[in-house]
Image (tube, coloured by chain):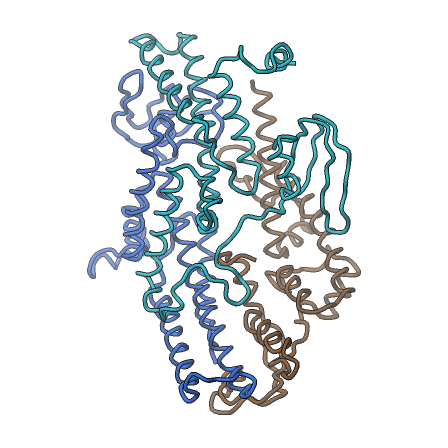
Chain colours: A cyan, B brown, C blue
Amino acid sequence: MDIDDILREVDPIFHDIPQEQRDLQELTRAWVAERSAPELLPWPANGLFERINANIKTQIEKVEELTGDMDPKTNFALIVIQTELERYRYLVRSYLRARLAKIDRHALHYLSTDALRARLSDAELAYATRHQALLHNHYLSSFLSSFPANLQNLNDSAAGISMIETPDLESAVFIRLLKDTPVEGRGVDADGAMDGRESDIVILRWSDAKPLVEAGSAELV
Amino acid sequence: MSYYDIDSILTDAEKIPCTFQLDIPDLGYLDNTPTQPLKAGTKVNLPLWLAEMLAIANASDTEGKPFVTFDLPPALGNDVVQALKADPRAVPLRDQSAHFYGLATQMMELSEEQELAAILRKTFVIRASEVALYARKVGGVGHKGKGGADEGSNLGVGGAGEDFLRALDEWERSLFRKAHDGTKSGKEWMEGIKKH
Amino acid sequence: MPMYGDLGNKLVQHAKRTQNLAHLPPYQTELVRAVTREVRDLDKDVASLLEPFQGSFDPSADQPTACTLLVNHLSIRRNKRCLLAYHRTRTDKLEELVWNGSDVLDLAGQQAGGANGASAADGGASSSLSPQEEDYVRQYGDLLAAYKGQWTDIDLTGSLEPPRDLFIDVRVLKDAGEIQTEYGAINLTKNSQFYVRQGDVERLIAQGYLQKLG
């Protein structure tokens, strides 16, 4: 049992946990979930990353203050802050890169509807739109512009294959149940169902797991 | 099936034996006789990307008959299927087709060969666990750290294993790479834990 | 006799090899041109096949022509897919190089020159990139820089390995000049060894200037 569990029991609303620590928790959860889910998850809209950015800036300033001309190898406090800072940076970087990899792979899909576009941050939306334009221009200037006009599209679905690639929502994920809940999964030969208990770990298709995760009954691990 | 995927594009280039069902004046070139019409009954090996659509194009039309009919390619012929029935691990799939499973899957979608489908599924399961077994062996022993010559090689697998690994189809190769990398990073992680 | 789509297939085989290479092999200018030409020829064939029908072609009334049109149409689609996949495989590779901080344009020139020393004599070393790819690399570099600019404190192109040792021992493999760290300047001369912050030198390790010691 760690400090979070104790605090949760004493004060379910988390008032005593400092904002910074809650942000770190949320970032860690978002990072784990983004790396596990086969499709792009919504960008946190609650200002999480603005706060995290500000926090990282503060820590960098603290490091600069502490550094002076001391020997870094002997300054334990400095090393601790530096280590924490590196971890923070790593989490944000790894999270952003996992998202960008998904966006690059299926850019036309995520740009295709308002609902999907809403999952991207403003910066991601700008990046994806421009990246797609660069690619289309590159194809046009390399060969596509000498094609007949009706064949210059990048988004039709002739001959049974859509040119717009989509993420595989049927791939398997691990989830941890956050409360008792029935779990249903579709299989190749037969479907399965079970009465899940809190903290059970279950492996199933993302399409089956998604409703549980969105309802807050489970989290990706 | 994904539009930009190199392996699925190469799978679509696999040829299957087709028979044209009508005379077609302009397609003689498909049978190496560009100046002659293509006669009904002519057998031509066509790539999947062409054969598939020619076989189903008119099928929904009650009056029309399909432009071509097709047979199973040699890679899924009787000899191969009998050998797979006997021991899936002993068949060098790559010699049949570098995209054996991709080809097989597409053929199963076009025809209702239930028995063949069952044999292929069993083949896949048995061979996949064999692939995973070798990947663990190689991933476990082949890692000698930075610049070591053994890194990622098949040394230590033995002669029979070498033959098996050489003859994997593309899908099995990617499975092997994933299982190998997984084992390797798992081992590195364990070593990292021990150090600290 | 070569069939429509055969040349496109060659391009995709090039792409398959490219996926397994660390560097980018030369752009297949001639092959790309030939496949594109094939598309235009097929399109002209379609137009001339349809011409006598004056826009009222009934496929069920003329099956042989319907079949020929379908073959032409599918061949066009196939070539388009091959061309797109070939170019996409290469831009994927180029983007990866941009992310790794390599000077792609410089590197490509060196490679082409090194692989074929004679080419330097007759008209200068040619790049393994097409001129369009060189443009693409510049534009993508700008795009990435713009996105990275929103995350200046993160170093978005840094290591994706979870941080473990904050300070590491490194050996200098080739002179890299002076680098600025938060603890002041370090002069990296060949064969010297340093105990430095990992985050400061990751780039130099990736580019082969430094070797991480055990």
Which residue is found at the position 65% from the left and 39% from the top?
Answer: A209
**Farthest bottom residue in view:** B36
- Residue C171 image point, x, y percent: 37, 26
- Residue C120 image point, x, y percent: 23, 56
* Observer-nearest of C193 and A40: A40
- Residue A99 image point, x, y percent: 47, 38
Image quarter (top left, top right, bottom left or bottom right) of the N terminus of chain A? top right
Which residue is found at the position 51% from the left and 60% from the top?
Answer: A162
Left or right of residue B67: residue A180: right
- Residue B174 image point, x, y percent: 58, 49
Left or right of residue A68: residue A4: right
Rendered view: C4 above or below A6? below
Which residue is found at the position 46% from the left and 22% from the top?
Answer: A87
Give the quarter of the image for residue C193.
top left
* Observer-nearest of B187 and A173: A173
How many numbered marks are there? 0
